[in-house]
Image: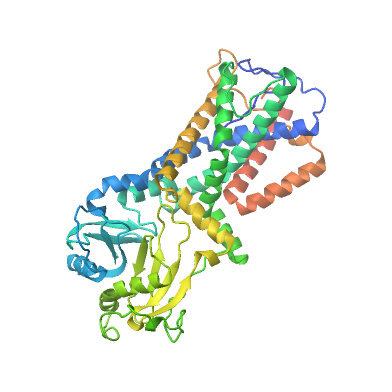
């Protein structure tokens, strides 16, 4: 929710001119807190609204990107060929023939029949975290194109572009400030708006005997009607807004570092599989003696010099690497990425990648030249916080529940856009009758109405939250300083 759910002063009615009134006797403590929330919700909504609007529009488009890229890049991602597929090693060889100038780093076999194989190459001409994907028909070995692939989710150019727009407006590191600013304040605005609407509904029930919390009052007119739509829609999507704010902060520059440090201190981080070979024992004794685990090349990989040559040699073991991983339950039915090491001291990793309805991404480190599993990282053994973070990221990206996930995120984004528009409309409707400017803000003085102990508690909470989320803390401090300065100026010159 982007604007005040109940920004009228006690003497105002929807659509009435905003006029100064005698503040009268001191308010009860609950009324003072409501007054404080109203002012915070109003100013935060007015200032943060434009940033939230950009985040909502770009996020809504990004939510549909996983499905959109299946259509946009159908020629690369899918094939109509039928028949028996060639080995993964042969498919990698076909891709290497297409790009002999690059070093192969990983391969993503088809997740389902009709999909192409993605052979990933390290390309120094591409941006950080981006590899070149060469798409190979597993049946015909025909190369169907090549595209940059970004990150662990394997985003293709359209989704990558929308991701950059949503994350940093394509302005690089400085641009991340906009999204962190929006995510930092979204939960504050939403919770303050929720509290204000609950207070408003309770007041209506006391005075009129009825009040709607979750449904629209179709008898409302003017500003009251705008407020009703703004609040009810906000109530219905508030859990989604809180979720998007929390998960968005994990990607942020400043708050994200604090989250990572906290998770590391509490041992809530995602474990990493040990890929060092050395003399480490097998994770599953006797694995080399299991039938069907022969590497098919007779002995160890032949000696080679240079990382590209080692990677090319190791690529011949990808089928055995996948078979070893499946023998311990990794990658039996899910999309996987097989990393191909470029040295002789690192194991292959077979990782279950983010995909629709993938709830437990396991990873196996294997040494196919010796037919052994080096280590297995089970999602079931992760700390609870790491599990929730992994699932939350997939949900935020629109991947966890496939198309359903994407449609829900898109609807939430559209609803947030309307919340912001209604909020600004309410501000305009609050103007004095006949005026061509927005209405005035809720009056100041809420803090002065609270007892000192309550002010101290609020200050301590604000300082702690502000330290952990700097782009919430510093703007809040700046607002308080400016507000106090203006308040003192008005005391000196009441006509200002």
Q: Please give left or right for residue 252 compared with residue 77 in the image.
A: right
Q: Which quarter of the figure has residue 60?
A: top left
Furthest residue in direction front, as rendered: 291
Residue at point 39% right, 72% down?
327
Whole-percent x and y of residue 441?
Answer: 63, 27
Q: Quadrant of the N terminus?
A: top right
Q: Is residue 125 visible?
A: no
Looking at this rendering, what residue extends furthest in the top direction? 434
Along the line of sight, the residue nearer the viewer: 52 or 218:
218
* Rendered location of residue 27, percent (x, y): 79, 28
Q: How is the image coloured?
A: rainbow
* Residue 281 in sight here: yes
| Residue depicted at 30% across the width and 85% down the height | 300
What residue lies at 74% left-to-right and 29% top-to-bottom? 491
Q: Quadrant of residue 304?
A: bottom left
- Work out which quarter of the rendered image holds the C terminus and state it: top right
Q: Nearer the viewer, residue 445 or 328?
A: 328
Whole-percent x and y of residue 269?
Answer: 55, 64
In percent of width and height, residue 118 lies at 28, 61
Q: In this rendering, is residue 26 above or below 363?
A: above
Up-down relation of residue 488 to residue 379 (above or below): above
Number of callouts in the render?
0
């Amino acid at each position: 929710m982007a604007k005040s759910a109940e920004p009228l002063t006690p003497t105002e009615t929807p659509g009435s001119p905003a006029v100064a009134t005698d503040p009268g006797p001191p308010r009860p403590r609950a009324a003072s807190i409501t007054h404080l929330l109203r002012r915070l919700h109003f100013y935060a909504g007015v200032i943060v609204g434009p940033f939230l609007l950009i985040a909502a529009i770009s996020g809504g488009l990004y939510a549909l990107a996983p499905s959109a890229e299946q259509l946009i890049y159908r020629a690369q991602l899918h094939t109509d060929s039928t028949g028996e597929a060639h080995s993964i090693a042969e498919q990698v060889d076909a891709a290497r023939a297409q790009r002999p100038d690059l070093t192969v780093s990983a391969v993503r076999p088809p997740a389902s029949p009709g999909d192409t194989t993605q052979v990933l190459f390290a390309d120094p001409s591409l941006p950080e975290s981006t590899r070149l994907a060469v798409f190979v028909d597993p049946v015909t070995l025909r190369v169907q194109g090549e595209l940059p692939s970004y990150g662990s989710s394997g985003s293709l150019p359209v989704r990558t572009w929308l991701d950059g727009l949503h994350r940093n407006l394509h302005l690089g590191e400085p641009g991340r400030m906009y999204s962190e600013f929006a995510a930092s304040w979204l939960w504050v605005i939403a919770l303050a708006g929720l509290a204000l609407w609950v207070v408003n509904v309770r007041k209506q029930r006391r005075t009129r005997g009825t009040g709607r919390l979750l449904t629209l009052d179709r008898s409302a007119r003017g500003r009251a009607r705008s407020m009703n739509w703004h609040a009810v829609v906000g109530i219905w999507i508030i859990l989604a807004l809180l979720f998007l704010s929390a998960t968005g902060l994990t990607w942020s520059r400043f708050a994200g570092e604090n989250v990572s440090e906290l998770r590391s201190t509490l041992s809530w981080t995602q474990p990493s599989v040990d890929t060092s070979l050395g003399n480490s024992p097998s994770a599953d004794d006797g694995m080399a003696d299991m039938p069907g685990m022969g590497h098919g090349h007779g002995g160890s990989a032949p000696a080679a010099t240079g990382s590209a040559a080692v990677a090319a040699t190791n690529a011949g073991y990808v089928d055995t690497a996948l078979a070893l991983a499946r023998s311990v339950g990794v990658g039996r039915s899910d999309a996987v990425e097989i990393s191909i090491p470029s040295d002789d001291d690192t194991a292959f990793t077979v990782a279950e990648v983010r995909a629709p309805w993938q709830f437990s991404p396991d990873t196996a480190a294997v040494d196919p030249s010796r037919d052994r599993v080096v280590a297995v990282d089970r999602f079931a053994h992760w700390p609870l916080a790491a599990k929730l973070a992994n699932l939350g990221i997939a949900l935020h990206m629109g991947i966890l529940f496939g198309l359903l996930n994407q449609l829900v995120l898109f609807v939430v984004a559209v609803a947030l856009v309307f919340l912001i528009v209604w909020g600004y409309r309410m501000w305009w409707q609050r103007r004095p009758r006949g005026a061509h400017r927005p209405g005035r803000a809720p009056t100041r003085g809420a803090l002065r109405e609270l007892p000192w102990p309550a002010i101290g508690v609020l200050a301590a909470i604000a300082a702690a939250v502000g330290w952990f989320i700097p782009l919430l803390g510093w703007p809040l401090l700046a607002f308080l300083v400016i507000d106090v300065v203006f308040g003192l100026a008005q005391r000196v010159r009441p006509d200002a």
